[in-house]
Image (spheres, grey):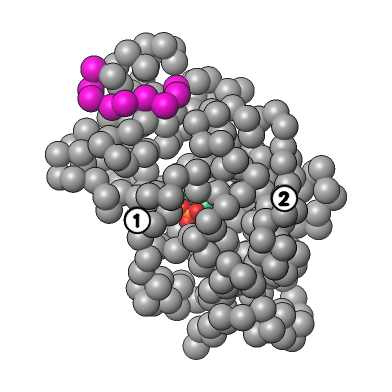
Amino acid sequence: MIQTAYDLESLRSWRNSLKGSVGFVPTMGALHIGHGALLEKARQENDHVVLSVFVNPTQFDKKEDLEKYPSTLQQDIELAEKVGVDLIWVPTYPQLYPDGFKYKITEQDLSMKFCGAHRPGHFDGVLSIVMKLFNLVRPHCAYFGEKDYQQLTLIQGLVEAFFLDVKIIPVATVREESGLAYSSRNVHLSSEDKKIAPKLFEIIKNSSSAEEARHQLTEAGLKIDYVEDYGPRRLAAAYLGTTRLIDNVELK
Ligand code: AMP
């Protein structure tokens, strides 16, 4: 049976009772098949699996985005139970931010680009919460999706910079048949948007340059935040109506 923890004491006493390896999947809930892939990998590779569900306010640059973020806790618990997660941890803001976010972690290079350039402070929020979650869960392995490639790269950098004793395991992006990456925010797409949304991946994958991709995406009706090549990847973010989609692809 899956266990639930809603306070730090329960999480700590669960953690202290364990022997063997701990795999950790941090999420903001509204779980989908993409999250499922992270959980399954964690299940295969560890003695114990913990999932956190916390919509982290400090990584939202827009109040409306935070307020409309979907929440489906009961379904999340069911999915987690199916995969064989041992503990689902649902902390609160006052528990995780006793200092009111006076202390934060800032990366000064990559975090300022791409999503960071369009969402000021976003990665300060991400890196700070990940550090807090790691310190509380003390996992051996933590699983992150390649869908959020910039986030994954920054977390790998965080682990290196602060000598954190955790192995970061990347998981390939899980997509719908149309090619659209699963995302909790996809529930906000209208049926018209849903027809256009798969073009984000299709175009960044098939275009010969970032510039060509920008041109084709605009023609397709997406409002671009950025499309840029970064190392071996092409990264993109664009709006369909008020829904922001992000994706990336390995360059051929
Ligand atoms: P989120 O709840 O959106 O913050 O995501 C929690 C974790 O799931 C992050 O590591 C994401 O990169 C990962 N994730 C989200 N969507 C997908 C997907 N479609 N495929 C693989 N991983 C994903």
**Could one spot residue 139 in this view of the protein?**
no
Q: Residue 68 carries which label?
A: 1
Write the residue at 67% across / 56% down: 101
Q: Can residue 96 be seen in this view?
A: yes
Is 126 displayed left or right of 115 in the figure?
Answer: right
Dot 2 falls on a residue whose secondary structure is loop
Query: Which secondary structure lies at badge 1?
Result: loop
Residue 203's place in the image compared with 209, above or below, is: below
Density class for disc 2 (Cα within 10 Å; few <14, some 14-19, many ≥20) is some
Q: In which quarter of the image is residue 35?
A: bottom left
List x then y, in percent, for residue 78.
39, 77
Number of the label disc, if any, that sits on residue 104: 2
Residue at figure coordinates x 61%, y 49% from the top left: 125
How far apart are labels 1 and 2 at the CA level? 25 Å
Q: What residue type is labelled 2?
A: Lys
Front residue of 103 and 208: 103
What residue is drawn where x is 18% and y is 45%?
190
Query: How many C-alpha atoms fall within 10 Å of the one at disc 1: few (<14), some, or many (≥20)?
Result: few
The residue range painted magenta reads: 219-227
